[in-house]
Amino acid sequence: MQNKFRSISLSHKNAPVEIREIIAIDEASIHSLLIKLKEFFSVSNTLILSTCNRTEIYYSHELDLSTEIIKLIGLEKGITDIVNYLEYFRILNDEVKAIRHLFNVSMGLEAQVVGDMQISNQVKRAYQASADLDMAGPFLHRLMHTVFFTNKRVVQETAFRDGAASVSYAAVELIGELTSNTYQPRILLIGVGEIGEDVAKNMVHLPDAKITITNRTFGKAKTIADEMGFDVIPFENCFEAMKDADVIVSSIMKSEPFITKSLVKSFDIQSYKLFVDLSVPRSIDTSVEDVPGAILYNVDNIRSKASETLKKRLAAIPLVEQIIEESISDFYNWKKEMSVSPTINKLKNALEQIRLEEMERFLKNADEKQYAIIDKVTKSMMQKILKVPVVQLRAACKRDEADQMIDLISDLFDLEKINEKSSPGI
């Protein structure tokens, strides 16, 4: 049986967040799983991708090992009833479908926010982890470099990655634009509900900023702050922290404005103070804009920007899919050519064996100069003889007729017999 590239996927499309959290694999567990997969099942060309939205394993093997691999995840995570989660996994044993899925995931077509830019870096890290453990053979190396080249084409040739398509990322992008001339801007994030937490995670794209988080529930703020490497303060200290902040992001549930015009007037605004209101209902009084130096953006401004970008991304999907199909076709042309490489090598060896035997037979008394000339001439002849069958083999690959051509050339040149004859110990 021949090895096939397969995938196992648990994602936001088929599993709620509470299930994804249970199955999610950290970096150390990925390393451990890769080693176990190699030792227990002798899998090759393996890739493990784990993000907040998906946990996926790609692997090459002649057998469907999906159930065994899922049980191995359970063993790694200490989940004794992992079989109860099987319904949340999508199994792809068709090689073309598994490869197309990897491309779709890597380009951001399968992301919660279509065109998500973070996924390409996450895929690169997953590939690096496999390469470091020698779990990536020629097949996966070629496949991943095709994925990376495709990603480059998508960026250069489409609008699929332009702008910010989620409210949280659009907010962070806006903050980055407005603080680009401020040295280490001080950002205060108030509230880490669903949107606030997403904003916090996206703030990794502001590496120079000094970020502080606060929340009514201090424990939740501390957990996120510790994870992201940010500062955290008790909620009762947030008014004091507002005085020093260059940017205040409010994402809290309140029936009346939490940040009022009178409060903002009490701040000594030297240059500017940016207010970003992500709350619904709004938590920042719109009249704060009357205060000199105060700049206010609300969720509608930001959502409008994100929605426009999303429309452009959705419109670009057909072109992205076309680029992916072209890349998959190119990859399979390479794969087909790889399948004829052993025959090409056998033919080269067979002809070289004949050449050397005839050289030895007829040039026993030749001097060094004569030998060099005839050696050069016969090598050139062999190259020209090889050219036609090699070209024909590669052409047959593209017509899906490689097997017939391999049999024909093997019989014509008696390759099996010649190579057996030249093999040691036979």
Image (spheres, helix red, strand yellow):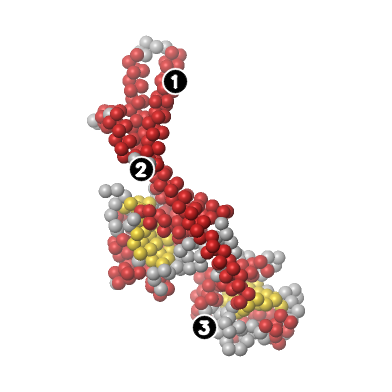
> Circle 1 — which element?
helix
The image's mark for residue 217 is 3
Picture quadrant where residue 290 is located: bottom right
For discs 3 and 1, the disc positioned in front in the rendered view: 1
Residue where numbered disc 2 is placed: 400
Relative image position of residue 222 (x, y in whole percent): 52, 77
62 to 426, vertically: above or below: below
Tag 1: residue type? Lys
Tag 2: residue type? Asp
- Relative to the observer, which residue lies in front, 400 or 184? 400
Side (left or right) of 268 relative to 360: right
Residue where numbered disc 1 is placed: 376
Q: Residue at x 48, y 68 (%)?
A: 112
Relative image position of residue 254 (x, y in whole percent): 57, 87
The image's mark for residue 225 is none
Earlier in the chain: of badge 3 and badge 1, it is 3
> Circle 2 — which element?
loop
171 to 252, vertically: above or below: above
How far apart, in angstroms, are the residues tagged by discs 2 and 3? 63 Å
Side (left or right) of 405 relative to 374: left
Tag 3: residue type? Thr
